[in-house]
Structure formats: structure tokens, C-alpha cells
Image (cartoon, grey):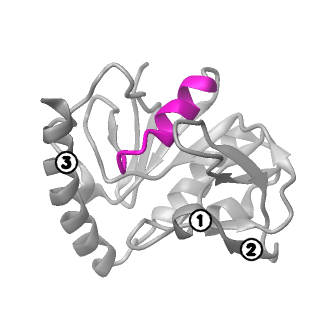
Amino acid sequence: MVDDLKAAARKAAFAVRKQAFAAGQGQAAELLADHLAQFGDRVLAGYMPMRTEIDPLPAMAQHPGPVGVPVIMGAGQPLRFAAWGPGVAMEAGAFGALVPQDLAWVLPQVVIVPLLAFDAQGFRLGYGGGFYDRTLAALPGAVRIGFAFAAQEVAEVPIDAFDQRLDVIVTEQGVREFSR
């Protein structure tokens, strides 16, 4: 069953990411910022890093256009994105993720996606809530950029019909592009 495979993969992926996080992210944020430059001032969605997630904030802060961060609206719903920038007042939202105190909504054209693991086909393993898969399905024209440590790559991510493929993965070792 795919759910059992995903649960086992998540457990292993958390351990790998924890080790990679302890080693540092190297030039990952700079590589992400360089990759994002091609999108000019398009609306970007990033995320507020939690636990051992790789930190996209330096790249998000350099983006010349509007930037949003995810807000969980409820179980089974896609994420919405609230405008963010350095210095914006934040508060704890669902699952402890920081969200802006004032929710001014933005519709992203480029989405930086956190993950637990990824594979060479461009699939990602998330936390299991389906929030990003629903969101990416609702934004079919958005550029989907996974941001991770290179150590998070696995031979194959277990997938089902709902899993959404990434366009790009950026790690501290470089940028890889996939075709959808």
C-alpha cells in the first residue's frame, strides 16, 4: 500500500534531513536566489522554515517582486499565500508555522516547495497532509521549485495519483530541472 510506503519513507527522510541540516546548507540560498532571478518580479511563494527544513528566507528576501508565505486554511484545502517581507510581523499559525499577522493575499506564479525527499523524476515526499499537492494542482501554470539538501534525494519517491511533480529542485550542489 502506498500509504505504508510513504510512512516508512518519511521516517527515513526525517533522519537524513536532520543530518544534512546539522552539516549546514552551504551555498543553497545563493543558488536558489540565482535561479529565481530569471523570474523577475513575478509573484513568488516561499515558506517559513520549520525544524530541519532548508532555509529559503535569504533568497525570498532578495526577490524583487511580491513574496508570499503559506497559510493553512483547513484540512483538505489548498494553501493560500499571504504577503511577506523582511520585518513583517508574524505569528504562529497552524502546525506552528509562522504566518503574517495581517493577511494580504497574493497568487503565486513561482512556488518554492519544502519537502522530506525527492527523486530524479521530480517527485517529492511531503509531510502527508496533501497541502502542497492540492495547492500545486490548483496552480497548474506555476513554476514548482523544490528546495532541499542534496542528501534528501532517494531512488524513488512512492507516489499516488494526487502527487504533483516539481519542475526544478535546488540543493546546495546545484539546480536540476525536470519535465512535467
- Residue 131 in the figure: left or right of residue 128: right
Distance in Å between CA atoms under marks 2 and 1: 10 Å
The quadrant in which the C terminus is found is: top left
Q: Is residue 136 magenta?
A: yes
Q: How crowded is mark 2: few (under 14 residues within 10 Å), some or many (20 or more)?
A: few
Of the numbered discs 1 and 3, the one sitting upstream in the chain is: 3
Label 2–label 1 contact, CB within 8 A: yes
Q: Does the magenta stretch include residue 74?
A: no
Distance in Å between CA atoms under marks 3 and 2: 31 Å
Residue 164 image-quadrant placement: top left
Asked which secondary structure carries label 3, the reply is helix
Residue appearing at x 52%, y 31% in the figure: 134
Of the numbered discs 3 and 2, the one sitting upstream in the chain is: 3
Residue that sits furthest to the front in the current view? 75
Q: Position of residue 41 (x, y in %)?
A: 81, 43
- Label of residue 7 in the image: 3
- Label of residue 90 in the image: 2
Q: Position of residue 117 (x, y in %)?
A: 28, 49
Residue type at mark 2 is Met
Asked which secondary structure carries label 2, the reply is strand
Above or below for 93 versus 135: below
Above or below for 2 versus 71: above
Q: Which of marks 1 and 3 is in front?
A: 3
The quadrant in which the N terminus is found is: top left
Q: Which residue bears the numbered disc 1?
A: 48
Q: Where is residue 173 in the image (x, y as percent from the top left)?
A: 34, 57
Residue type at mark 3 is Ala
Residue 84 image-quadrant placement: bottom right
Residues in magenta, as a range: 126-139
Q: Where is residue 37 in the image (x, y as percent from the top left)?
A: 68, 47
Of the numbered discs 2 and 1, the one sitting upstream in the chain is: 1
- Residue 64 in the figure: left or right of residue 108: right
